[in-house]
């Protein structure tokens, strides 16, 4: 990894040269860096093939022409885009937006129920699907998607499948053939290129670019409407965070329909660099690192945790001696990094005087550990970094909270992680650490294009809109051109989250530092973000578990964890009756709840309801649970309305919850 010691360029804070919408952004890059690679994708032999900005822009125009002239897409249409990250995704995204339409994206891991709901609620007239499997999810209950009239497939299916779909009244097109048709049309009538580019010019920055649905299983439709301006706003300031050069390669592994990866995709375009498509699988990534030598990438905390575990396991297989040396220098590296952060001021501070005291804390261990760290660089750290292609400058982490242990493992091997924060409703980045001010324990400075304040709250409710001083915990609010236009067809939900002054309630609890950095301390809202970046709404899962005649209360847990777990309060009478009927000795009730028979009963009660057949995703499965012998009471775990008071539950059962997520 090349260390990010690059000096800041003397650039203005805001790049006011960017155009008003995203297709015009790509067009501008195709003009000024036409021959620089824009995309790189593996062929059937596993070799990366690059496509320049000029080539990709040509494909965007070709697809746009066919969408307009043949399929009949018009301004304001909503087009489904059901696919994982791949070259065709970006071309489709840009082509749809070029016509003033908007895409409605989702990944291939979505259930048929989710996809049909999204297509129907958004009234999509057509859609792009990665393969026939995704289209079949729609056709399972076709009457739920009456608006869908046509479908484009990225992967070519059998002719029989096309005939099967078209018999159901949906016209099928193949992506590669559409590009050929578009090329033929433009060659026959070159004026069509000007027609498409005129459509691009007509799109105002406040027009909707995409509808991203954030809750697929709660029954509450929340289609986040993001405009071109929402994205362009953060692109104007991103150069302040990382020293990207023209032609730099980014390795792309996250689902691009997630707002974080999508925003970074537009950052890559704005900074005239290249996207190399890979998969979030360690063996695949490590192979691709060596092939394309990326300098940058973004990922979720679980990805970094998996890599750290994988590195440990790999070294452990080499024998006790080598593993002992490895562990010694990793421990040295962690302590040295901590000391260096304190000495160099890379620590969150809540007053100007804090820097002096941090320096005193760190100076002695810094001096003592320096020579050991230098040896570790030669013996351990450099060798690990070389496995990542040898060119990395930094990686961007988002979509969940970065665990301290994971971060300091990578800091030990001198691997730069830049953590950011935001939400889909803010397109999404509100803050991010820069390579120059990379302070662990926070999620970076607030971007210059947005306002953030922390206000007083109680039980998740705002009780004052006056900003709190640095170091005071409260609810995080944000305002600026990044904030969404609202939830599609749900003005009621929009009013709940955005006030009359334009402040959006993030639902997150946190602190602002003296340097205007955000430190997240918890979540006031119910949404759980797993370590892999998946958003999970616990309410429906809890409601479904409570359908069991044995369950009184269920609390789903998993914020910043690998998986979901649950606290379950059983109906005591129902459990005791089951025990009598099945010859299980009752004795003490607490002991009864720990018997294999009762645990097996609740495992079956949960798994029979929370599964893919019931419309739940794999990440929504309850992997561990704990049975509690005492019912929740009002004033403690329950509010006056008998609603769960989650933060109190987390405090009261902290030890039990830690046990559910223990690796032991």
Image: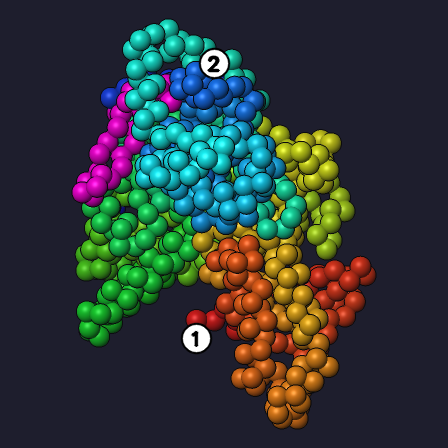
Q: Is residue 309 visible?
A: yes
Q: What is the quadrant of residue 84 in the picture?
A: top left
Task: Determine the residue positioned at 76% across, 47% down.
Answer: 463
Which region is colored magenta? 36-63
Give above or below for 162 relative to 321. above
Please tell me which residue lies in front, 280 or 612.
612
Determine the image quadrant of residue 304: bottom left
In the rendered view, does 195 fall on the left or right side of 42? Answer: right
Write down the residue under mark 2.
199
Q: Nearer the viewer, residue 294 or 442?
A: 294
Q: Nearer the viewer, residue 381 or 319?
A: 319
Of the pair 264 and 62, the residue shown nearer to us:
62
Instruction: Say whether residue 50 is magenta.
Output: yes
Rendering coords of residue 227 (x, y %): 55, 27
Label 2: which secondary element = helix
Residue at figure coordinates x 32%, y 53% from the top left: 281
Residue under label 1: 664
Decide if residue 44 is on the left or right side of residue 604: left
Q: Is residue 654 magenta?
A: no
- At a point 59% along the width and 82% down the height, the residue shown is 598
């Amino acid at each position: 990894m090349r260390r990010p010691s690059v000096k800041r360029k003397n650039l203005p804070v805001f790049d006011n040269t960017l155009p008003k919408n995203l297709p015009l952004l790509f067009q501008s890059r195709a003009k000024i860096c036409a021959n620089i690679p824009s995309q790189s994708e593996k062929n059937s032999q596993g070799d990366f093939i690059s496509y320049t900005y000029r080539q990709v822009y040509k494909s965007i125009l070709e697809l746009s022409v066919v969408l307009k002239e043949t399929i009949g897409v018009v301004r304001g249409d909503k087009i489904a885009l059901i696919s994982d990250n791949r070259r065709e995704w970006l071309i489709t995204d840009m082509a749809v937006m070029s016509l003033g339409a908007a895409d409605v994206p989702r990944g291939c891991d979505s259930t048929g129920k989710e996809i049909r709901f999204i297509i129907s609620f958004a009234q999509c007239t057509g859609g792009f699907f990665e393969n026939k499997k995704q289209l079949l999810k729609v056709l399972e209950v076709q009457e739920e998607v009456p608006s869908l009239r046509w479908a484009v497939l990225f992967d070519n299916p059998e002719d029989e499948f096309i005939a099967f779909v078209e018999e159901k009244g949906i016209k099928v097109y193949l992506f590669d053939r559409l590009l050929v048709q578009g090329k033929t049309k433009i060659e026959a009538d070159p004026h069509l290129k000007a027609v498409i580019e005129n459509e691009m010019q007509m799109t105002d920055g406040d027009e909707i670019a995409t509808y991203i649905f954030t809750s697929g299983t709660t029954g509450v439709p929340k289609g986040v409407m993001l405009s071109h301006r929402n994205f362009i706003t953060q692109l104007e300031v991103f150069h302040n965070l990382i020293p990207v050069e023209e032609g730099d390669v980014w390795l792309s592994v996250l689902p691009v329909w997630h707002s974080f990866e999508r925003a970074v995709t537009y950052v890559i375009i704005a900074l005239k660099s290249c996207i190399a498509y890979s998969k979030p699988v360690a063996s695949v990534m490590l192979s691709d690192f060596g092939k394309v030598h990326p300098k940058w990438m973004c990922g979720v905390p679980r990805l970094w945790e998996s890599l750290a575990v994988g590195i440990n396991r790999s070294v452990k297989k080499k024998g006790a001696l080598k593993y002992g040396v490895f562990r010694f220098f990793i421990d040295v590296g962690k302590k040295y990094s901590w000391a260096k952060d304190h000495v160099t001021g890379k620590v969150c501070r809540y007053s100007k005087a804090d820097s002096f005291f941090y320096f005193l804390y760190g100076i002695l261990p810094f001096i003592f550990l320096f020579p050991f760290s230098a040896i570790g660089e030669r013996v351990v750290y450099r060798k690990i970094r070389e496995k990542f292609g040898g060119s990395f400058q930094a990686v961007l982490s988002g979509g969940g909270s970065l665990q301290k242990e994971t971060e300091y493992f990578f800091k030990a091997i001198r691997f730069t992680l830049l953590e950011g924060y935001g939400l889909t409703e803010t397109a999404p980045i509100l803050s991010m650490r820069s390579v120059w001010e990379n302070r662990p324990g926070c999620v970076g400075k607030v971007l210059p294009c947005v306002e953030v304040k922390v206000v007083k709250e109680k039980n998740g409710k705002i009780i004052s809109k006056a900003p709190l001083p640095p170091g005071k915990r409260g609810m995080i609010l944000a305002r600026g051109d990044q904030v969404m236009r609202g939830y599609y067809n749900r003005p009621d939900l929009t009013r709940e989250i955005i006030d009359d002054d334009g402040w959006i309630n993030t639902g997150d609890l946190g602190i602002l530092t003296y340097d205007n950095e955000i430190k997240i301390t918890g979540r006031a809202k119910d949404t759980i973000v797993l370590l892999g970046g998946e958003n999970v709404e616990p309410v429906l899962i809890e409601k479904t578990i409570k359908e069991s005649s044995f369950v009184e209360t269920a609390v789903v847990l998993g914020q910043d964890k690998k998986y979901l777990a649950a606290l379950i309060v059983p109906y005591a009478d129902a459990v005791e009756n089951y025990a009598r009927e099945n010859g299980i000795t009752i004795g003490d009730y607490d002991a009864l709840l720990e018997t294999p028979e009762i645990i097996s009963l609740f495992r079956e009660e949960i798994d029979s309801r929370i599964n893919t057949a019931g419309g739940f995703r794999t990440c929504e499965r309850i992997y561990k649970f704990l049975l509690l012998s005492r019912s929740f009471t009002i004033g403690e775990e329950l509010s006056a309305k008998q609603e769960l008071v989650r933060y109190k539950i987390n405090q009261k059962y902290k030890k039990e919850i830690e046990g559910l997520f223990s690796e032991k």
